[in-house]
Amino acid sequence: MHVFTDPKNFDAYLSGFLWILKLTGASAVCALVLGVLLAAMRVSPVPVLRGFGAAWVNIFRNTPLTLVIFFCYFGLFVTLGLTLSDDLFRNIYWLGVVGLSTYTAAFVCEAVRSGINTVPTGQAEAARAIGLSFAQTLRIVVLPQAARAVIAPFGSILIALCKNATIVGTIGLAESSTIMKDLINFNGDAVIPIFLVFAGTFAAVLIPTGYFFGWLANRLAVKR
């Protein structure tokens, strides 16, 4: 553990995980919003919207995340000139958020859609009978009930998102996996301690997260 007694190494370690948490938080919010919209499209009575939602899910669920991240950098930034921040480092961060969000939204969409399918059809029929539109029915009646059924899947998606965030290091963001690689390169005699510290930090964050979402799902589960 002597590697982390060096203040520079320890600061780099903390900075790497801070970027992971920032990527996870921003991407989770964006993916949730986009995923709910896609789920609404997939159950929409409009064929074009259903087709768009299905295409999005099928494309991103069957495309490696690494390719998505590379496209955001080399396609959107390098080729098309998309700039989300004047600072290069932060621009890479936001490109990573775009890639992670669009990819994760496909999984959020399917989780929400499965939750919608657990709501009895009579609920939506009753809402339409009293004059609510499709959007109102979804927002007021269906989604609040479906939310209880998707808490556990959301926990799994969040955990996967946090681990997937390390892929953004491939386009130049100094997140935890990049820092770990650099520390190993300069401290070849401490490979196992370095690995254990980084793996242990992920476990310390994600294991309680999984238990929390499991507890919350049981707490809010519909009693039948």
Image (spheres, helix red, strand yellow):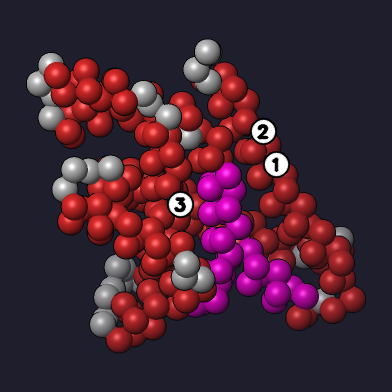
Residue 33, image quadrant: top left
Residue 169 is marked as none
Residue 205, given in percent of the width and then of the height, sits at 66, 44
Give the answer, above or below, for where 125 lies relative to 190: above
Q: Are marks 2 and 1 in contact (CB under 8 Å)?
A: yes
- Residue wearing tag 2: 211
Type of secondary structure dominating the magenta stretch: helix
Q: Amino acid at mark 3?
A: Phe
Farthest-out residue, right: 189
Few, some or many residues within 10 Å of mark 1 (<14, 14–19, 20+): few
Residue 44, given in percent of the width and then of the height, sits at 22, 43
Question: Is residue 24 visible from the viewing direction of this image?
Answer: yes
The magenta-colored residue range is 156-184
Which comes sooner in the sequence, label 3 or label 1? 3
Query: At x 25% / y 59%, what residue is drawn?
Result: 52
| C-alpha distance separating marks 2 and 1 | 6 Å
Which comes sooner in the sequence, label 2 or label 3? 3
Query: At x 56% / y 61%, what residue is drawn?
Result: 164
| C-alpha distance separating marks 2 and 3 | 20 Å
Give the answer, above or below, for where 220 lies relative to 74: above
Residue 207, given in percent of the width and then of the height, sits at 70, 41
- Residue wearing tag 3: 107
Q: Amino acid at mark 2?
A: Tyr
- Residue wearing tag 1: 207
